[in-house]
Amino acid sequence: MDHTERLRRLTINDSRAGGEALSFSTDDSLTLDPKAVALVRLAAIVAVHGAVASLGAQSDAALAAGASTGEIVDVLVAVAPVVGLPCTVAAAPRLALALGYELEDEL
């Protein structure tokens, strides 16, 4: 299915497109590479105030897809102008924990 058909189906709430959009697997029909998908999903988790476990799972997916920890932190910085400073500051310690940093020792 091409991108215009996918967008049309999402617009009309077609269940076939909705199920695909809500899938947590990397769909072969996406034009984004797995690393980009993982980083975009990480940004979305930050935007919705996701829990440490969610940030951790998606950070692990990003690392497995070839992202560096620096790129993962860059995602947080990149979304800051969109989600706002309070959201960014709130997400920073959760992301640090998700990446395995001990806040008292490392930061």
Image: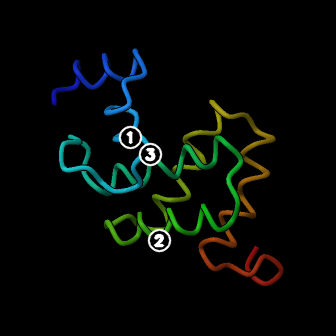
Q: In the image, 107: left or right of 78?
A: right
**Which residue is rendered at x = 65% and y = 63% of the image?**
95
**Which residue is rendered at x = 60% and y = 62% of the image?**
55
**Which residue is rendered at x = 72% and y = 46% of the image?**
88
**Which one is in front, 38 or 18?**
18
Specify the quadrant that holds the C terminus: bottom right
**Which one is in front, 31 or 29?**
29
The kind of secondary structure element at disc 2 is: helix
- Determine the residue located farthest toward the front in the rendered image: 15
Q: In the image, 71: left or right of 83?
A: left
Q: In the image, 46: left or right of 66?
A: right
Comparing labels 1 and 2, the label whose residue is closer to the camera:
1
Location of mark 1 (residue): 19
Q: Is residue 7 above or below residue 99?
A: above
Labels 3 and 2: the sequence-earlier one: 3
Labels 1 and 2: the sequence-earlier one: 1
Q: Is residue 86 above or below residue 11?
A: below
> Identity of the amino acid at label 3?
Val
Crowd tier of the residue under label 3, counting other residues whose Cα lies within 10 Å: few below 14, some 14–19, many 20 or above? some
Labels 3 and 1: the sequence-earlier one: 1
Check whether the beta carbons of the residues at disc 3 and disc 1 lie within 8 A of each other: no
> Identity of the amino acid at label 2?
Asp
Location of mark 3 (residue): 40
Location of mark 2 (residue): 60
Q: What mark, if any, has residue 2 been given in the picture?
A: none
The kind of secondary structure element at disc 3 is: helix
